[in-house]
Image (spheres, grey):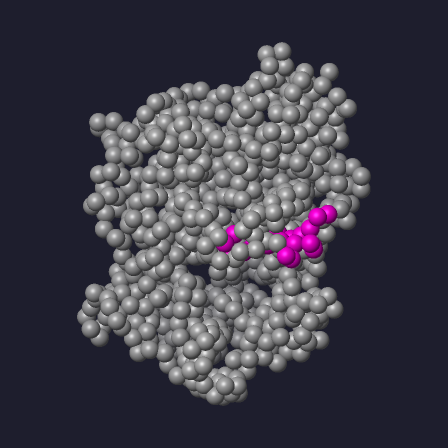
Amino acid sequence: MSKLVIVESPAKAKTISRFLGSEYEVEASFGHVRDLPERADDIPAAYKQFKWAKLGVNVDNGYEPLYIVPADKKKHVDNLKRASKGVDELLLATDEDREGESISWHVLKLLDPKSKTKVSRIVFHEITPEAIKEALRNPRPLDEDLVRAQETRRILDRLYGYTLSPLLWKKVAPKLSAGRVQSVAVRLAVIRERERMAFREAEYWDLEADLQTEKGKFKAQLARIDGDKVATGKSFDPTTGLLKDKARLLDQQAAKELVEEVKANQTVWTVKKVDAVPGQESPPQPFMTSTLQQEANRKLGFTSKRTMHLAQNLYEGIDLGGERIGLITYMRTDSLTLSERALTEAREVIKELYGSEYLPDKPVRYKTKAKNAQEAHEAIRPTDLARRPQDISKFLDRDQLALYELIWKRTIACQMKPAKVLRTSIEIESRTKGSTLLFATSGKQILFPGFLRAYVEGSDDPDSELESRETILPPLAVGQIVDLLELKSLEHHTRPPARYTEASLVKKLEEEGVGRPSTYASIISTIQDRGYIFKRSNELVPTFTALAVTQLLENHFGELVDIAFTARMETELDEIADGKRDSVGHLKDFYRGHEAKPGLEKQVETETENIPFPSLTVGDDPNTGSQVVIRVGRFGCFIQRGEGGSGNTATIPDDLAPAELTLDKAVELLERKGAGPEAVGRDPKSGQCVFFRTGRFGDYLEVAQSKEEEAAKDKPRRVTLPKGVKPADLSEEELGQLLQLPRSLGKDESGEEIIVSIGQYGAYIKCGAEARNLEDWRAAASIRREEAEALLSQPRHRRGGVSAGPQVPRTAIHEFGALEGASGPVKVLPGRFGPYVTDGKVNATIPKSIDPAEITPEQALELLVAKASSPGTKRRGRKTFAKRTTRRSA
């Protein structure tokens, strides 16, 4: 009896096939096999006549979706059809969530098996022999409600994106997109940036005392003066910079006078209060998708997309010396449940590694609290907790091991006893002739480490890190006299609200019930790809385009970017999944609406002509009185003064955050542009004048061209100005050093040229795919070849100083090495116009339907072969590329 099992990915197919008998054949669908058309060219000829066809949804007849097989999926569909011919049983084994259910449904529709063929749906949340056998024993029919919910979500996102995006092209800038969840995520970042723009810094001072007893030293801060609370950062209104409570504000003079008064009077320091309260710290919950992304971002520096790609690798299977097996459970989940088997395994490991004293009397069970939780899986955990990270380290690459270790430690820790601590708060009084000063300090002592033995942030050695979690005070008693070693006044400034990081934005979306575990990574990736957000270190900084688009949507389509409304839509989609809500009626209410409340189509139709081109007011120029505004144009954002025109517009550097563009900064950029380039010296090499300029990517120097160079239309020689360096501060020698860049140091042993250069993010060395940053730009001008080679041979370092190891360089998404039929080593690299595959001679763009992080060697080779055989491969001119319809995305 022949049986065909269909899964999503080749890696998953390869793992599962090892657990099944010879009567089973396992094939991969390579993700979704059908989708709505993306471009006008994708629409079948029979439907082009209909107005609704460009939406891909028949809004005139039951919101029926128009499904097509994308060009890059046709061969996979043909392969599935060939494999399914004559089989006795078809087992749909895609992932156990809405997307997986939908993929199985579409596969079934395309294959259209004969009535005698038995069709079953099998699900599992870990790829192990036990889980696969259990799934085979418990097949079920397809969940039509779950499929309908996913389809409704897809149609809803299409209607939202394809209706609003053209409006943004018309009113803001080309190639922008709107999305049901994407636009809310952008708005959250914009709201935070507005708070930073409204923020007013305040200065305050306090005193810090270094004190001593016979048993040790400690520090204490001034808390009260004559019973009045001393102002701290929380005492100020962030939008006015003024005190918002009755705290006593110390300025520099008052703080220094207090110090002098204490010193002059040789005051006695007496302990007035000692509170020692025992407490405990509970272990963290096991990972679900959102918390895994947050922790991996905070501790490992991984993006959400990178985390999910690595988790997918671990879930689908790793070859452990001849045995390919899934190492973690399904990674898209908002469940906190752990199976009984996992609980038993965890307790056995804890007892073996740490002893019975770390084991609770009974297993700890967690309950999901996430708003709108709907994914029916386990929490993310190792499939076998006895498989310790060190046991399999040789089979994993650096990042896979780091993520597996994070998951393993967290799972073990969540089943250990809480840590027992002793929290101590101390108050010490000092009397001067004029005032009574009360100083305070607090400490924490770990009495029993509990789960901290297994899970301590930022270290592979928990024992050494336990000390840093403690602040141990010497034993003190009420009435005891302590000695003053030093008293100093300290200056402080209030800080604006922190921008979102990937971790904190995912947390916020989860708290608000916006999006789903499977969508967080793609949301964050999309808002960066669309130019709404850029990353600075770990911050997500909204662009001026994001502010303009958010302003437009808030003013004219406020409900569509309202957080509560978007969360409510998620709840309604859940009701469709549960069979409690009609999907067609839901879509009709959203798109066409009714008499009392018009839908999206009518709103856009009515509002379009009333929507002005968005602009952001900066203020009035103090010199001219003209209003200064930010506008979005075809070529980016710019500053405009008054009516604009010559001398009254200036480009905004791409890396300038909206909260940093003050009125003074805007006027400076306008004046600099109006005055023309500033001459800062002469190029020692050519003798030509060197000018200081500002562009979209920041400040740079440009060497004037000779008449011959101008006639030949040569590109001007330019070099990025290092951050924080002003042209006027450069000596003649330093200017010459800077203008040497980029410079070649020769070729390494493999023939790759070693280049030293400077870019938007500082000076660096590059050789092939390897690159290393240089701390000081001056090093770029003086570094020798052997020094550069030594630096390139060192492992990369992540944030926090953690070695990133000497494996696949960060600049390469994948390195497949030599593949038969390729001209050289095959790599997947990020490019200006998107990721691409290269073998050194042929470059092939990766289609949007293929995740570059998940592309297989076979797919990479196939793209290269197809590109090499294309008639236009050797013609690099613009005329060889057909004009494409701009892709709209929900």
Residue 435 location, quadrant: bottom left
475 relative position to 656: left or right: right
Towards the viewer: 383 or 828: 828
Q: Is residue 637 visible?
A: yes
Name the foreground residue: 283 vs 805: 805
Q: Is residue 103 above or below residue 723?
A: above
Seen at 30% across and 72% down, the residue is: 670
Q: Is residue 821 magenta?
A: yes
Q: Residue furthest right?
A: 322
The reply to whether the magenta stretch includes residue 563 is no
* Up/down of 40 relative to 242, above or below: above
- State the image coordinates of residue 427 (x, y, percent, origin top left): 49, 61
Residue at left 55%, top 80%? Answer: 740
Seen in the picture, residue 661 relative to 255 is either above or below; the reply is above
Instruction: Magenta stretch: give its range.
Output: 820-841
Q: Residue at x 70, y 55 (%)?
A: 824
Horizontal side of 303 relative to 195 (left or right) equals right
Magenta stretch: helix, strand or loop mostly: loop
Toward the front, the furthest residue is 871
Observer able to see residue 354: no
Task: Tell me: 671 left or right of 751.
Answer: left
From the top left corner, tell me how far across and down residue 260 is, in percent: 43, 79
**Residue 834 or 203: which is nearer the viewer?**
834
Q: Which quarter of the rendered picture does the C terminus lie within?
A: top left
Numbered circles on residues, count: 0
Residue in the image at 50% along x and 83% along y: 735
Vertical placement of 473 versus 370: above or below? below
Residue 155: image location, x then y, percent: 41, 31
